[in-house]
């Protein structure tokens, strides 16, 4: 059994900071959390134990192309079949591509992330490659595969009548044999009939479904032109996704729909800003009742560093609320921790209690910019950098540890 002593722990699903005499884990499970008094501020340094972070929207496939799409529009950089990303991915050898994925997953653990939801291109091959990288690093990759090539021509998409061919259904089954679920990029990439078929197949295999919606207004207008419905309404009706990505240009009616249905929505403010798109309506979505998550999106646009995403998201949300009180930093931190429970369930909790998986991050609050924090949760969201991460642990396995962390870890 291993333990940390005289630390601070964010405890329970509400992430309440407490002094802690002993934080013990045995194997893959938290064995004891000897809680002391609640703690909002500190006068001297301490170790701070927080839940492991979850990144709900990545594209690890393009980790080999950092900042390659600089200056490109969304369509130029990322749309199929001729966008920059897809042209460049086709040039990667398996060995090169795998090495980039492994390096970026290791970087994620360096920044406190224990798991991510990845939208993986390149069909069966792409899902296989990421699965291998996940095994090598220990970072949990929930893989949402897609077709290697779009199964419909532009004319077929405009007619919106055809279903998937027998070959496409075979490819779908092959992807799902490796991946944890399915997601094409947008609702406009497939026909209504195809989305309904994919929903049936994924339900039969108990697989996840996700889709990008409302990243820009073109998603909505294209869907309206073809089907008479916006892309979000179409997604909820035909595909019933477990996760909706972006909602960047969601209007008040769409925000209400997301809230009424308690939809899991992954926001990506830094990626939207990097593309010159509007920032997502974080404040309105927080008030709506939707279950908000956070992602870093394409490696082409951003490093997969959730610490940077937390800081940016919090400050954008404060600006949108327009007052000093909202949001509480806890509401933003939950987007990468305890809000994951509604989305994934199972052995994913996103918070720390006795008997739950030993999924945690140890932060060093002895540094000058942290050791006299007057508000621990605000400091975690806005001031912690990768240099302050001492260790990242997933189900008892140390994915990352800084030099000297071993001197803090005791054998109980």
Image (cartoon, rainbow, N blue to C red):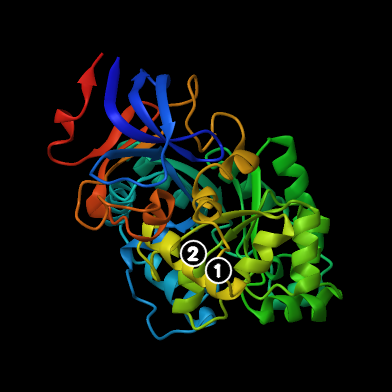
Residue bearing the label numbered 1:
317
Residues tagged 2 and 1 counted as in contact (Cβ below 8 A): yes
Quadrant occupied by the C terminus? top left
Residue bearing the label numbered 2:
314
**Residue nearest the observer in this picture, 156 or 378:** 378
Establish if 395 lies above or below 277: above
Q: Residue at x 50, y 35 (%)?
A: 351
Q: Which residue sits furthest right?
A: 228
Q: Quick one: label 2, few (<14), some, or many (20+) residues within 10 Å?
A: many
Q: Residue at x 72, y 51 (%)?
A: 166
- Return the x and y of residue 329 as percentages of the image width and height: 50, 56
Q: Residue at x 30, y 58 (%)?
A: 93
Quadrant occupied by the N terminus? top left
- Return the x and y of residue 209 as percentages of the image width and height: 66, 49
Number of labels in the image equals: 2
Quadrant of residue 397 in the image?
top left
* Left or right side of 240 for 66: left
Q: Quick one: label 1, few (<14), some, or many (20+) residues within 10 Å?
A: many
**Residue nearest the observer in this picture, 122 or 338:** 338
Q: Which mark is residue 260?
A: none
């Amino acid at each position: 059994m291993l333990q940390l002593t005289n630390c601070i722990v964010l405890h329970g699903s509400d992430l309440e900071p407490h002094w802690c005499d002993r934080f013990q884990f045995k194997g893959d499970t938290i064995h004891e959390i000897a809680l002391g008094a609640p703690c909002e501020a500190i006068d001297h340094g301490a170790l701070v134990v927080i839940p492991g972070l979850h990144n709900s929207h990545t594209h690890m496939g393009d980790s080999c192309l950092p900042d390659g799409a600089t200056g490109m529009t969304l369509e130029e950089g990322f749309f199929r079949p001729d966008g920059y990303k897809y042209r460049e991915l086709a040039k990667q050898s398996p060995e090169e591509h795998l090495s980039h994925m492994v390096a970026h997953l290791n970087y994620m653990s360096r920044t406190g992330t224990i798991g991510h939801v990845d939208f993986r291109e390149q069909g069966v091959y792409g899902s296989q490659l990421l699965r291998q990288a996940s095994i090598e690093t220990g970072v949990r990759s929930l893989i949402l595969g897609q077709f290697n090539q779009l199964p419909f021509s532009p004319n077929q998409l405009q007619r919106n009548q055809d279903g998937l061919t027998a070959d496409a259904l075979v490819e779908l089954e092959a992807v799902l044999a490796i991946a944890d679920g399915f997601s094409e990029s947008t609702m406009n990439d497939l026909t209504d009939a195809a989305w309904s078929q994919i929903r049936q197949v994924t339900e039969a295999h108990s697989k996840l479904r996700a889709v990008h919606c409302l990243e820009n207004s073109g998603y909505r207008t294209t869907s309206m032109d073809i089907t008479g419905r916006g892309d979000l309404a179409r997604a909820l009706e035909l595909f019933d996704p477990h996760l909706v990505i972006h909602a960047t240009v969601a209007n008040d009616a769409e925000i209400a729909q997301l809230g009424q249905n308690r939809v899991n929505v992954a926001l990506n403010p830094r990626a939207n800003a990097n593309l010159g798109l509007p920032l997502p309506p974080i404040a309105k979505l927080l008030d709506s009742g939707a279950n908000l998550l956070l992602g870093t999106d394409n490696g082409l646009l951003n490093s997969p560093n959730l610490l940077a995403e937390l800081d940016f998201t919090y400050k954008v949300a404060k600006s949108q609320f327009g007052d000093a009180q909202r949001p509480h930093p806890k509401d933003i931190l939950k987007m990468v921790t305890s809000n994951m429970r509604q989305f994934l369930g199972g052995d994913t909790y996103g918070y720390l209690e006795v008997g739950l998986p030993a999924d945690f991050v140890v932060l060093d609050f002895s540094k000058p910019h942290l050791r006299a924090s007057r508000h621990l949760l605000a400091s975690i969201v806005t001031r912690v950098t990768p240099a302050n991460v001492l260790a990242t642990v997933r189900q008892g396995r140390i994915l990352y540890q800084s030099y000297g962390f071993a001197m803090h870890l005791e054998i109980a």
